[in-house]
């Protein structure tokens, strides 16, 4: 890993140990390939670029507001972080593509393109000797965390069902005249993966992870591991989801996960989460790949950890067991101690059960020496599969600005979250290392450690 | 179309020489338990007999009245009852594909003779290839009748719609529900993930699982795939794309991979699961080892969403990677379980890829697509076919490519036709290529080729 005095050495005290050595199970130390970040991209209700999103957060104004995609006047849940006036042409210039993809794919492709553009690797590749281009593409991959299915696409069958009137043979006969022939392709959960590959001619390692909220974070972890294992030299990691649709909002409301008006993480008045929509992306490379073209390195992925609790789809353990283990694994993976962490971006989704168990986990790991803790969902909502990765992108922007943004909706810390180092006000980070936490359905917990250059 | 400027033989040099895991002392992975629920058998033994005999699971669809669809045949799982997993509380949350998954996973656990305990639960992982989770037709029809008759959703009507307010419908439709049921059922507390790269999902799940053990993150993984798209919505999606064979009068011959008259795939359903263990731990407990899961290859075609290029670019890289990852060469492979969907494009592209990778060995290496009998299990395909490879190694038998009659010069492979082959199978390769362009290739190795000991650990 990085030598002392490398351009990526840590800015503020305490000095983080930046020479992680992972032990293989046999106990033989491996030299772990350094995984650097050469570009980021993000879009959500709070902005179309990482810096703009950070600015919104620092302004203390949440971008969550009344849902505008349908009339919610009679609805029990009415608030979400919608991207205002989402213009497909601004997100994906190739208009031919718009018929083949969904809203969630638009934001995913936009974030991926932003990260790829920021990294500058495409211009470098295109200037390579002709016989070097194909091998370069073979060693460039994409790993995407995607929300999987949605409900709105299924309503594309409603006109057909109205024609068929419950008669299945008629449904079959009238199918081709009433449903878009590309329906299945529009519905593919792995559309962003396929289209980002085609657009940039990426031929390397790839995956689409449909693992609820942790999908985006796992995309980063799996990309890091692919680079370490030598499966690729460059991987774009993406997470995307647009869950704000009537049936999804209704279900989350019915199972008791949505707030009435405001997402107040760790607050005594907290009453649930709220959806947001959008995407985040990181261009990750081996240090050698970035150095080869003199790329500007904006940060480094130091390590990741992941654990499940196995209690069922919606159940969460009160003691934060899965999260404790995920954080411990991430620290070990990065060769860092809890004291090295400069700020924690908590999952902070605003539901009482998740917030309380997350606080318990952080108390267990960090005790009284906890670095500043914050969360971002209060400002743009819960992006589900994109949550962990967009929050990683914003965390990097915050570290660069040397600030831990406050949680502006926090008024009174909930008793169940006592000891948590949260604040409504911005604070300086303790070092340039951020721990970003992410939790999802099926009792899944992910922890990611990144730092800025 | 291959990218301009790719010289012949360039693929191999894109690999990193000397980066072969198995020769770097990384942890090896053993397959110690298998489970299958397929259109030709609800367990491993029944399925295997059908694969050797080339008995097709194709038949007219019985799950719903499909008579109006351009294709009304499929390979359904038949007479299925969740016999091993009878936890009624759990099954309430399970849709058809989840039930296949729970059953096949339970078979694999019992076969392996090991399951997570409180002491080692965090050292167990779970990696599954999951289907698209399209809506259940009956639920959608109910919502349509309640608040969609105009042809568009009336959101206000949704507020008192039955399915839209039923948490069970919500849970059953979540992409992570299969993972939730499996980790709960078996008490798995380590790395748990679900992947979806369409028809490559099952293979990618196996690859992910193997890497988790190599990394030392877990010691054992329950890995598999499950899917069921034989529903009005699922069939519609494929009919609209004209991807299915419409040989409605001859369902048992509808899937004929690599045959010149092939005209689309036969939709199947089911689940395949394995228990994977770190090699030395499996040996230490005297486990029966079917095979080593030795290599994983993973590439994007980046050509078209539905097709691989005719020259095999994309699949070629995945196959090279898997071989390199396993520390193997084409000469080591005795059997390829092809993706072989029976669509005109796939089989041509895959044949070109196999020829490009295997060179002169293409005349020797046995190839069959078991989709000829089971149909295409979509997200479960790669997992089920991975199990087929493990069985081919363990039993020394190669299942047939059923329904092959008219040779296609574009698919000039050493296909296993007419009768299964009984031979020593040193190594296998399993291909899975998905819509979206993901290509997965999995390589397995006979246990004796690993440490000179047979499946049960006796020295040769």
Image (cartoon, coloured by chain):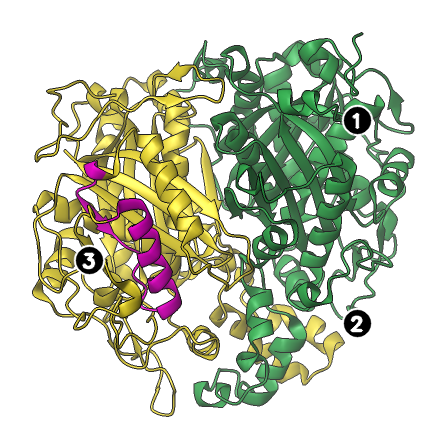
Chain colours: A yellow, B green
Residues behind callouts 2 and 3 on a single chain: no
Question: Is the residue under label 2 in contact with that under label 1 (CB below 8 Å)?
Answer: no
Mark 2–mark 3 Cα distance, whole angstroms, equals: 48 Å
Mark 3–mark 1 Cα distance, whole angstroms, equals: 53 Å
- Left or right relative to A378: residue A11: left
Q: Which residue is mark 3?
A: A48
- Left or right relative to A425: residue A285: right
Q: On residue B392, which mark appears?
A: 1
Q: Which residue is mark 2?
A: B65
Judging from the image, mark 1 belongs to the subunit labelled: B
How many residues crowd mark 1 within 10 Å: few (<14), some (14–19), many (20+)? Answer: many
Labels 1, 2: front one: 1
Would residue A63 be seen by someone viewing this image from the given angle? yes
Residue B173 falls in image quadrant: bottom right
Lower position in the chain sequence, tag 1 or tag 2: 2
Quadrant into which the C terminus of chain A falls: top left
Q: Is residue B328 above or below residue B227?
A: above
Question: Is the residue under label 1 in contact with that under label 3 (CB below 8 Å)?
Answer: no
* Residue at the front extreme of this rendering: A368
- Left or right relative to B306: residue A94: left
Q: Which residues are magenta?
A: A339-367
Judging from the image, mark 3 belongs to the subunit labelled: A
Residue A164 falls in image quadrant: bottom right
- B446 falls in the magenta region: no
Residue at 87%, 48% in the rendered image = B252
Residue A171 falls in image quadrant: bottom right
Instruction: Assign a secondary structure to mark 1.
Output: helix
């Amino acid at each position: 890993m990085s030598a002392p005095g490398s351009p990526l050495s840590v800015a503020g005290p305490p000095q983080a140990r930046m020479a992680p050595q992972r032990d293989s199970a046999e106990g033989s130390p491996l030299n772990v390939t350094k995984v650097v970040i050469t570009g980021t991209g993000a879009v959500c209700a709070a902005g179309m670029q990482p810096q703009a999103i950070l600015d919104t957060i620092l302004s203390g104004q949440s971008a969550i507001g009344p849902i505008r995609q349908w009339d919610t006047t009679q609805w029990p849940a009415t608030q979400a972080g919608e991207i205002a006036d989402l213009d497909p042409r601004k997100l994906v210039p190739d208009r031919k593509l718009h018929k083949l993809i969904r809203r969630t794919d638009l934001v995913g492709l936009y974030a991926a393109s932003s990260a790829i553009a920021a990294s500058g690797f495409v211009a470098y590749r295109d200037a390579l000797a002709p016989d070097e281009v194909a091998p370069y593409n073979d060693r460039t991959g994409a790993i995407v965390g995607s929300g999987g299915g949605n409900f709105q696409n299924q309503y594309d069958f409603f006109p057909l069902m109205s024609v068929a009137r419950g008669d299945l043979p008629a449904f079959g006969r009238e199918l081709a005249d009433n449903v878009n022939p590309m329906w299945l392709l529009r519905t593919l959960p792995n559309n962003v993966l396929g289209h980002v590959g085609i657009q940039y001619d990426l031929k390397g390692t790839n995956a689409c992870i449909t693992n609820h909220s942790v999908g985006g974070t796992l995309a980063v972890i799996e990309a890091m591991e692919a680079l370490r294992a030598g499966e690729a030299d460059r991987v774009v990691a993406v997470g995307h989801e647009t869950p704000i649709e009537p049936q999804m909002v209704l279900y989350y409301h019915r199972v008791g996960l949505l707030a009435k008006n405001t997402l107040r993480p760790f607050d005594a008045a907290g009453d649930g989460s709220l959806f947001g929509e959008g995407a985040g992306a990181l261009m990750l490379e081996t240090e050698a790949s970035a150095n080869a073209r003199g790329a500007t390195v904006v940060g480094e992925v130091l390590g990741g950890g992941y654990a499940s609790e196995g209690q069922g789809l919606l159940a969460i353990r009160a003691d934060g067991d899965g999260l404790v283990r995920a954080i411990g694994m991430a620290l070990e993976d990065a060769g860092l101690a809890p004291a090295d962490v400069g700020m924690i971006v908590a999952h902070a989704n605003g539901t009482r059960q998740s917030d309380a168990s997350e606080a318990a986990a952080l108390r267990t790991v960090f005790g009284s020496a906890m670095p500043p803790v914050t969360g971002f969902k209060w400002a743009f909502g819960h992006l589900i599969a994109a949550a962990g990765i967009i929050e990683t992108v914003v965390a990097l922007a915050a570290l660069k600005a040397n600030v831990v943004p406050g949680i502006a909706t926090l008024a009174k810390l909930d008793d169940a979250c006592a000891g948590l180092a949260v604040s409504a006000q911005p604070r300086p980070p303790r070092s340039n290392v951020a721990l970003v936490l992410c939790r999802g359905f099926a009792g899944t917990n992910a922890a990611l450690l990144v730092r800025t250059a | 179309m291959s990218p301009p400027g790719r010289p012949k033989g360039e693929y191999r040099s894109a690999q990193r020489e000397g980066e072969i895991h198995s020769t770097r002392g990384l942890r090896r992975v053993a397959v110690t338990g298998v489970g299958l629920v397929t259109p030709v058998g609800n367990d491993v033994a029944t399925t295997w007999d059908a694969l050797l005999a080339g008995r097709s699971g194709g038949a007219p669809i019985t799950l719903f009245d499909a008579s109006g669809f351009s294709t009304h045949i499929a390979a359904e799982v038949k007479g299925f009852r969740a016999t091993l997993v009878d936890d009624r509380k759990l099954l309430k949350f399970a849709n058809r594909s989840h039930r296949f998954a729970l059953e096949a996973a339970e078979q694999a656990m019992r076969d392996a003779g090991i399951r997570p305990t409180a002491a080692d639960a965090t050292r167990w992982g779970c990696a599954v290839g999951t289907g698209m989770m399209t809506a259940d037709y009956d639920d959608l029809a109910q919502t349509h009748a309640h608040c969609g008759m105009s042809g568009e959703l009336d959101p206000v009507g949704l507020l008192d719609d039955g399915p839209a307010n039923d948490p069970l419908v919500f849970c059953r439709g979540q992409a992570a529900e299969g993972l939730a049921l499996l980790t709960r059922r078996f008490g798995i507390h380590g790395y748990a993930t679900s992947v979806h790269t369409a028809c490559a999902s099952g293979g990618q799940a196996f690859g992910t699982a193997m890497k988790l053990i190599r990394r030392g993150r877990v010691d054992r993984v329950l890995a598999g795939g499950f899917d069921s798209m034989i529903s009005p919505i699922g069939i519609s999606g494929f009919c609209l794309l004209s991807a299915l064979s419409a040989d409605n009068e001859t369902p048992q011959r509808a899937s004929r991979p690599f045959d010149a008259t092939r005209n689309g795939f036969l939709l199947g359903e089911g689940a395949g699961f394995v228990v994977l263990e770190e090699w030395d731990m499996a040996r230490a407990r005297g486990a029966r080892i079917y095979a080593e899961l030795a290599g994983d290859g993973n590439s994007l075609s980046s050509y078209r969403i539905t097709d691989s290029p005719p020259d095999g670019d994309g699949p070629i890289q995945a196959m090279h990677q898997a071989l390199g990852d396993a520390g193997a060469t084409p000469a080591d492979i005795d059997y390829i379980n092809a993706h072989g969907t029976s669509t005109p494009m796939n089989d041509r592209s895959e044949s070109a890829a196999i020829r490009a990778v295997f060179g002169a060995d293409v005349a020797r290496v046995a190839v069959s697509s078991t989709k000829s009998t089971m149909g295409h299990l979509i997200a479960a395909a790669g997992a089920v076919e991975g199990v087929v490879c493990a069985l081919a190694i363990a039993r020394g038998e190669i299942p047939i490519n059923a329904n092959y009659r008219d040779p296609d010069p574009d698919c000039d492979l050493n296909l296993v036709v007419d009768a299964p082959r009984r031979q020593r199978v040193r190594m296998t390769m399993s291909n899975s290529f998905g819509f979206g362009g993901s290509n997965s290739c999995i390589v397995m190795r006979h246990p004796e080729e690993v440490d000179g000991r047979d499946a049960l650990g006796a020295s040769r």
